Image (cartoon, rainbow, N blue to C red):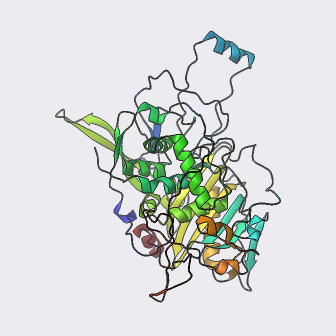
Amino acid sequence: MTQLQTPKASRNQDTGRLSFMVSSMGTASHTSTRGSAVNTSALLSLSSATPGTFTSVPTPSFTSTHVRHSTRKSGSNDKSPGEHRTPARRAVAPLAATAAALLLCGPLAAAPAYAADQPGGATDAVKPPAHMSTVGGKRLGRPDTQVDPKPGAPALPKGLSGKSWLVADAESGDVLAAHNAHWQLPPASTLKMLFADTLLPKMPKTKTHKVRLSDLEGMGEGSSLVGVKENYTYSVHDLWLGVFLRSGNDAVHVLSAMNGGVPATVREMQAHAKHLNARDTHVVTPDGYDEKGQVSSAYDLTLFARSGLQKADFREYCSTATAQFPGTFEKDKKGKKTRSSFGIQNTNRLLTGLGVEPYKGIAGVKNGNTTNAGATFTGVAQRGDRVLLVTVMNPQEKEANEVYKETAKLFDWGFKASGSVNPVGTLVRPGAAGGTNHPSAGGEDGHKHAQASVSSDHGSSGGVWTAVGITGGSLVLLGAVAYGVHRRWPLPELVRRRSRD
C-alpha cells in the first residue's frame, strides 16, 4: 500500500498554544436510514497541463441486491459551487407492484438540485427567530447584527449577505461581532468538524481497514467523494485526508463503520456537541448531508473548530492543501503490481486559491455546500499574534465563491477591530460549567473569565480540567475548579509562511 505523505509545508509541530478538549459520549439521537451506495467518484487533477480539471475515477461495480435508494428530493453535499459531483447509482425495483405504485404517484421526481444550482433550500426560515439561545451571552441570542464598537473602531464590511456569521478571537473566546449567531440552520459538511473532533482521538492514524461494500452504503445521492473503493485497504491517515481535503462522504462512512457504524457515530457526535455546549446542533448524519432536523449554528460551528484545532492531527489535516490518495493496483511493464495514487486538493478555496485569492495566514478549517444549507464555511487565520475564527452560513448574494469573499472581509475587519470593540459574547468552554458561566449581559463582564480550558491533544484527561494559566512565562493559579491557558497555538508552518508573504 502506498504510504501517504502530507506536504511538508503543512505539517504541524505539536508545540505552542495549548488549550482544551476531551471527548464525551453517551447521548442518543435520531439517525437516518438513507441512501444508495455510491460507485463512482471525482478528483481534482493536479496535472500541470490541465490544472483545476476533474476526471472520473472508476470503481468496482456494486453487485448487492440490497442497496437502498434515497427518496429525498433535497441535498447534494459538499464541495464548492461549480465543482464536480457524482450521482449515486439508483437501485432498480423490478416488481410490478412497485411500478404500479410509481404510476399512481405520478412522474418520478427530478434529480436533486446540486448546491451550485440552488444555494439555500426553500425549507429554510425566511427570518431568524425572535428569541434564540443565549449560550455565550444574551446579545448572541438576539436577531440581526451585534457589535459594540469603541470610538475609532472600523465599520463592519458592507455587502455581508450571510444568514448567520460570527467573528471570534480563537484564544480568549471573545466574540467580536455576530449576526444571528444562534440561528439553527443546515450545516452541510462543516458538520464534519464535529465528526473529526469526536473520532480523531479514537483511531491511530497508522491503523488500516479493508473496505467492505456495507461500509459505503447509506450515502446520499450526489455526495462528494474522494474515491474510496470496496476491497481496497486504506489507513486512517488516508481516510482523514479524504474527509478534510475532498470532503469525502465515502471516507466518512468508512471511518464511521470502523467506529461501530453510523448510528453509533451519530450518537457520539451528539454527545460531544452537548459536552461542547453546542446546544443548537442536532446531528442526523455524520457527513452533513441534508436531512430533516439536522441543524447547527454559526456559534456551534465555531465551537467545533476551536475544539478541533486543539488536536495536532486536526490542525495538520485541515491545513493541508494537496496530498496523494491511494488508487488501484496496476501492472508495470514487467508485470509487477503496484498501487497507484492520485492527487487531491483541498476544497477550501481560501487555502488553495482556486477561484479566489488565498487568504494570508489561513489554516483551514472546513467548507460545505448543499441544497438546503447553501454555502457554509468556518475558517481560522493568524496575523501577528492574533488568531481569529470566522464562520459564515448561507450567503444570500449569489456571486461565485461568495462565502469565501465574505469570510475574507470579516477576517480583515476582525484583525483591524481587535482591541477597538467590546466583545458581544464569548465562546464558552466545554463541560457543565461552561454552559452556565456565560455573560449575562453579552460582553460586559462575563467575557472576562478565562475560556481556554485544557486537556491533552489526545483527549485523554477524562474531563478533568487543568489548573494553569500562563503570564510572562510564569504559572499563575486562576481558580480552584476551572482554569485557562493563554499560550501561543501551534499553527502549521503553512500558515506562518503565508503570513510572511
Instruction: Specify whether residue 287 is in view.
Output: no
**Quadrant in which residue 229 is drawn:** top left
- The extreme top residue here reads 96
The percent coordinates of residue 16 (x first, y second) are 42, 76
- The extreme right residue here reads 130
Horizontally, residue 487 falls left or right of residue 112, namely left
The percent coordinates of residue 332 (x first, y second) are 21, 36
Considering depth in this image, is 113 or 454 the residue closer to the camera?
A: 454
Above/below status of 317 relative to 47: below
Considering depth in this image, is 475 or 407 the residue closer to the camera?
A: 475
Quarter of the figure with the N terminus: top left
Considering depth in this image, is 453 or 247 the residue closer to the camera?
A: 453
The percent coordinates of residue 286 (x first, y second) are 55, 46
Residue in the image at 54% along x and 77% along y: 484
**Quadrant in which residue 75 is drawn:** top right
Instruction: Specify whether residue 455 is in view.
Output: yes
Above/below status of 138 relative to 221: below
Horizontally, residue 354 falls left or right of residue 4, namely right
**Quadrant in which residue 122 is drawn:** top right
The percent coordinates of residue 415 (x first, y second) are 60, 76
